[in-house]
């Protein structure tokens, strides 16, 4: 999905969503905390909160506001609107069983990697990702697999918009190095990430193609203690590219 062009923003709408995101990121907030954070008069902030609560997007839990389950309603609809999501569950489950790792389906939206579905894995491995997580494309293997197959102009726009922030000392943070990495991914058909998202985190991913476009990526991830170097470098690439090809075939069967 291409990055949207900047346009006229309605300040009140932006403020409302910033409040929602703050409450999400902090696991809830009370009126005083929100007033301090947004540098708004308490009466103004109360107006935003009252509106969001009356529309059933917030719940008041003893003076502390939380996001309501109405977001689940919208989130489920958004997830179901991604055509590839409906064919991935069985493949992810089989992949997780075969590798004893966490299997992920990742897609691109607004120049970000979005973790859409998952199967398997223990709590340690899952700590590096969660369903609905949005993150940089240039760090995780799945993000790089997608980025390698986007049009050059879109890659340029993503880099210009988000930069290449380094999560660790191993993250690719130089555009020239990124271009070389993407070229390698296109040539070999899969991507790897080793300590680039977090120290100890590793992943291998392959893009899912249809009609000349990349629909997303399938990946497996785990810790360096779980994946030895030989398995990571020699076996997992074949396993993951086979799974991605299987998902592409199923997509074609479903959508033509």
Image (cartoon, rainbow, N blue to C red):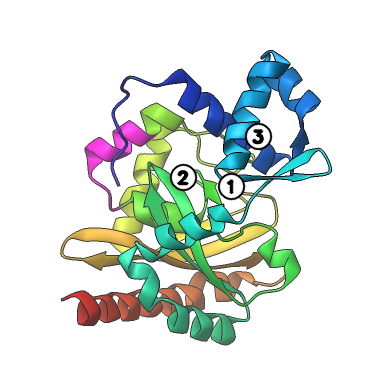
Residue on which the image places disc 1: 56
Q: Residue furthest front?
A: 54
* Element carrying mark 3: helix
Q: Quadrant of residue 146?
A: bottom left
The crowding category of the residue bearing disc 2, from other C-alpha atoms within 10 Å (few below 14, some 14 to 19, many at least 20), is many
Residue on which the image places disc 3: 22
Q: Position of residue 193 (x, y in %)?
A: 53, 56
Q: In this rendering, does residue 115 appear at all?
A: no
Q: Is residue 210 above or below residue 141?
A: below
Cα separation between marks 1 and 3:
17 Å
Q: Position of residue 12 (x, y in %)?
A: 49, 22
- Residue drawn at 28 percent across, 59 percent down: 214
Q: In this rendering, does residue 12 appear at all?
A: yes
Identify which residue, 139 or 23, lies in the foreground.
23
Identify which residue, 100 or 119, lies in the foreground.
119
Q: Is residue 51 left or right of residue 217?
A: right
- Residue 138 has which mark? 2
Q: Position of residue 22 (x, y in %)?
A: 65, 34
Cα separation between marks 2 and 3:
25 Å
Question: Over which residues does the magenta segment extend?
Answer: 149-158
Q: Is residue 51 left or right of residue 123?
A: left
Q: Is residue 49 above or below residue 25?
A: above
* Element carrying mark 1: loop
């Amino acid at each position: 999905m291409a990055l949207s062009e900047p346009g006229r923003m309605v300040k009140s709408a932006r403020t409302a969503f910033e409040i929602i995101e703050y409450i999400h990121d902090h696991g809830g907030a009370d009126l005083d905390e929100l007033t301090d954070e947004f540098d708004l008069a308490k009466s103004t902030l109360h107006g935003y909160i009252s509106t969001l609560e009356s529309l059933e997007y917030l719940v008041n839990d003893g003076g502390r506001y939380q996001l309501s389950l109405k977001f689940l309603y919208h989130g489920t609809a958004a997830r179901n609107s991604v055509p590839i999501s409906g064919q991935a569950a069985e493949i992810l489950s089989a992949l997780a069983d075969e590798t004893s790792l966490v299997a992920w389906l990742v897609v691109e939206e607004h120049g970000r990697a979005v973790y859409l579905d998952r199967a398997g894995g223990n709590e340690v491995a899952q700590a590096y990702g969660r369903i609905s997580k949005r993150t940089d494309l240039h760090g995780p293997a799945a993000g790089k697999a997608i980025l390698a197959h986007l049009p050059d102009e879109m890659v340029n726009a993503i880099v210009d918009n988000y930069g290449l922030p380094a999560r660790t000392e191993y993250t690719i943070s130089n555009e020239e190095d990124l271009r070389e990495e993407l070229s390698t991914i296109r040539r070999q058909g899969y991507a790897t990430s080793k300590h680039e998202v977090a120290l100890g985190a590793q992943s291998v991913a392959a893009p899912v193609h249809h009609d000349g476009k990349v629909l997303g990526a399938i990946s497996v991830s785990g810790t360096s203690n779980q994946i030895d170097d030989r398995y990571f470098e020699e076996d997992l690439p074949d396993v993951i590219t086979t799974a991605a090809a299987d998902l592409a075939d199923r997509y074609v069967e479903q959508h033509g």
